[in-house]
Amino acid sequence: MGSAGLVVPLAACNEAGWYGEDVSGLLPDLSFTMTRAQDGTRVTQADYEGQVVALFFGFSFCPDICPMTLSNLSAVVDQLGEDAAKLSILFVTVDPERDTPEVMTEYAAAFTPCVDGLIGTPNQLARLARRLKVTYKIEPHQPDDLTYDVSHGKSVYVFDAQGDARVIWPGFDTLQADIAGATGDIRRVMSA
């Protein structure tokens, strides 16, 4: 009897038609102040008003999660075609010590021109991470040691053109990620 009760809610989620998890009304709206690596400009959520935003926390020295996630996001951009102009991908570094503006710019450009690398102060980063319930940790290290480990959440957060949180993709860092499903989510958010 207990397992039968679980079937109904899961079926209801599937009927919603999202690839990711619908978080409408469950997470706060997009709100941040950071520096865009590509041009050194201070940006806020207002700079992305009118755009659907896919936001991801990571770092350029990440060996697996970040390159796979950004590669998958690049594939979504490709599938969107002309609609890609309505999407901004924000890659927020959790490792500003190594992720200089130059490093972030080069790293983001390797995937798609739709990626803006964002660098925040420790307080700016912590504020945005707390807002979205994202965890990250930089291993203790000596100031001149650049071989330290960083752990971080791997979800992609999708916000609509008004900055409202709409969808989370919790496992978009694998070869099995459903690019067509994610593209469908983006198109659905664009049309809302």
Image (tube, rainbow, N blue to C red):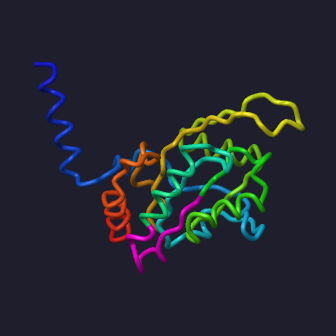
Q: Closest to the observer: 98 or 45? A: 98
**Magenta stretch, main secondary structure class:** helix
Q: Position of residue 15 (x, y in %)?
A: 18, 50
Q: Position of residue 32 (x, y in %)?
A: 64, 55
| 82 drawn magenta | yes
Question: Residue sitting at 43 percent across and 71 percent down?
Answer: 78
Question: Residue sitting at 68 percent across and 58 percent down?
Answer: 118
Question: Residue sitting at 63 percent across and 44 percent down?
Answer: 62
Q: Position of residue 55 (x, y in %)?
A: 54, 55
Q: Quadrant of the N terminus?
A: top left
* Magenta-highlighted residues: 77-90
Q: Closest to the observer: 145 or 8? A: 145
| 80 drawn magenta | yes
Q: Quadrant of the C terminus?
A: bottom left
Question: Residue sitting at 81 percent across and 40 percent down?
Answer: 146
Q: Position of residue 134 (x, y in %)?
A: 56, 39
- In the displayed structure, 71 sits above or below 23; it is below
Quarter location, residue 37: bottom right
